[in-house]
Amino acid sequence: MMDHEKVNILLVDDQPAKLLAYEVILKELGENLIVAASGREALPRARAARFADASLSCSRSLLNAPPERAFLRA
């Protein structure tokens, strides 16, 4: 098996049980899981690193403003 550079995966959910479930399932990938409990918490993390993937699920979304949505799409 070849070694590879770990990628960052951003997980965002405002429901702690779901966030924990995602972590438990995805930790087997061996990648860097970066977690946030809200959109507001996720933005600084998203700005601080490059991500191979992001999973966002926030029922009380703080990402309704166009600048935040545009940043996460970029």
Image: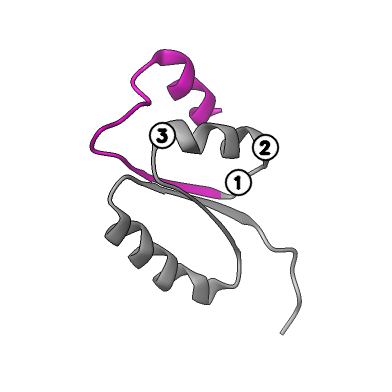
Viewer-nearest of discs 2 and 1: 2
User: Residue 55: within the magenta?
Assistant: yes
Q: Which residue is mark 2?
A: 48
Residue depicted at x 51% and y 71%: 27
CB under 8 Å between callouts 2 and 1?
A: no
Residue type at numbered disc 3: Gly
- Closer to the chain start, of discs 1 and 3, is 3
Split into 4 quadrants, where in the image is the C terminus?
Answer: top right
**Which picture quadrant has residue 2?**
bottom right
Q: Which residue is mark 3?
A: 39
Residue 50: x, y in percent? 66, 42
- Closer to the chain start, of discs 2 and 3, is 3
User: Residue 70: within the magenta?
Assistant: yes
Asked whether 19 or 28 is in front, the reply is: 19
Q: Which residue is mark 1?
A: 51
Asked whether 46 or 14 is in front, the reply is: 14
- Marks 2 and 3, how far apart at CA: 14 Å
Residue depicted at x 61% and y 54%: 8
